[in-house]
Amino acid sequence: MNDFLFIFRRDENDIPKLSPEQMQEDTQKWIDWIGGIAAQNKLNNRGNRLERTGKVVKADNMITDGPYMELKEAIGGYIVVTAESLDEAAELAKGCPIFNYKGNVEVREIKAM
Amino acid sequence: MQQQELIPHLFRTEYRKIVAVLCSLFGLQHIETAEDLVSDTFLSAAELWGQKGVPENPAAWLYTVAKNKTKNHLRRVANFDKKISKELSNEGVAEIELDLSEENINDSQLAMMFAVCDPSVAKEAQVALALNLLCGFDAQEIADAFLTNKDVVYKRIQRAKEKLRSENISLAYPTVNEISTRMDSVLSTIYLLFNEGYYSSSQNSVLRKDLCWEAMRLCYLLVSNDIANTTSANALLSLMCFHASRFEARLNEHGELILYKDQDTSLWNEELIVKGRYYLKIAFADGDLSKYHFEAAIASWHTIKEDSPEKWATVLQLYDQLLQLEYSPMAAFNRIYVLSKVRGKQQAIEEAEQLNIVKNHFYYTLLGKLHEGIDDTLALSYFKTALTLAITDPEKKLIMAHMHELAE
């Protein structure tokens, strides 16, 4: 079994304004989806969401405020799953609520140091 | 209670109390001496009560006889060996008063609980030892509970006792530091004990209420103690109160399990439900959430029998969070059932098929339930498979109840 990082990306501009009820519903979808992975005993780390703001530090000690990448591909959060293969890990990413707002999941195998 | 039932009952409840008090007097180095003295006391009870009848207050009788036997023992030992008597000050055996007050029994048992869960003792040995010393289980009963054999358990207990001796572990009130390192194993031991009583994998009695009450009593000892009164302990106690509230409703007169939806709610114990809510509130007041928090919260929803979308959606979230915190096959099974209530059977079936799980009777029973109304023939075949895999009679009867329901 290997560990895989799921990186959730979405277009920051595309995130709809949600009412408190809709936000709660959205949160529930995420919890259920991650719960489904946990129920298969394949969740290694429930991960975290990331704040929208950030800074980027560059070689010449220059620090800039985010966005640091294309706004379209901003990282919203991550989790770590356990699977036999990259293919199996990719299967697990299906049904992720990020697709509801046109985001995507990048699946990367973690190579232990 | 008849004498032949009374002595085993008292053995269960009183044996370990006296052992705990004797151990706090002698130290854990002399754990076997303590156990011998108490066993001897029960032997006397079995002989004398048979001839002369049961005394008016059997527990008090046991305490008195245990005290006398302890004094006699110490006198004998003092003649041969100064080891124990030295530790007991110089005032002489006659001055020794065995304090079998409720308070001292509680303190001794609490100290024993934390000593048993000393990190030097292996986890599985801790559980066996706790069941033995704190709950009066013999090796055979522990072996039955954990589906292993008696010799294995016996050796495990002996090794654990040897460890307590060799590590020179003291029976003292737990410190704040010990609470943080040992509380988890103390709680998991209590939790196992309760489950053994509630779900009872052993054959004879379907519901071993005694075990459940004992588990609740031990947990109550924790929450009554200033240092041991953690939010997780409250969560566990809450969970046990909620489960125990359905004692009278979950078995019929033949000792067979009654499905939750068929239970007579008037038999649910309102007092225990109220207690469960009380401890749940304390548990969620602050601090980290443990698996007991989520299980207790789930159990609290099950004390509300009316179905509502809100109920099932909330329970699903709780299972999601429980599984994220700590995976267990049972939680994964139960989550699927709840998922079927929230998202429909089709999605639940899909997720059930993805479960990375041993295909046991629980699994096939679940698949049977999910296919009900979608494909009854398939549902029946799942129930049949479940029936061939079930081990105990109550499990088989429960599956047959599902099959019966399907045929209706």
Image: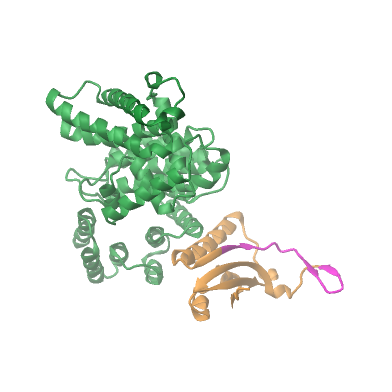
Chain colours: A orange, B green
Res B67 → quadrant: top left
Task: Residue B404 in the image: state x and y as whole percent.
Answer: 19, 59
The picture places residue B95, in percent across and down from the top left corner, at 40, 18
Quarter of image, res B254: top left
- Residue at 64% x, 65% y is A16
Say which quadrant the N terminus of chain B sits in: top left
Q: Is residue B22 above or below residue B317?
A: above
Residue B164 appears at what percent x and percent y? 44, 44
Image point 31% across, 46% down: which residue? B198
Report the side of B77 relative to B48 (left or right).
right
Q: Taking the image as drawn, is residue B5 in sight?
A: yes
In the rendered structure, does residue A10 fall within the stretch colored magenta? no
Q: Nearer the viewer, residue B107 or B387?
A: B107
The residue furthest left is B51
Taking depth in this image into account, of B292 and A18 the one nearest to the observer is B292
Pick the residue in front: B115 or B3.
Answer: B115
Residue at 56 percent of width and 61 percent of height: A26
* Residue A102 in the image: above or below residue B306: below
Horizontal and vertical percent position of residue B31: 38, 38
Q: Is residue A51 magenta?
A: yes
Q: Which residues are magenta?
A: A46-64
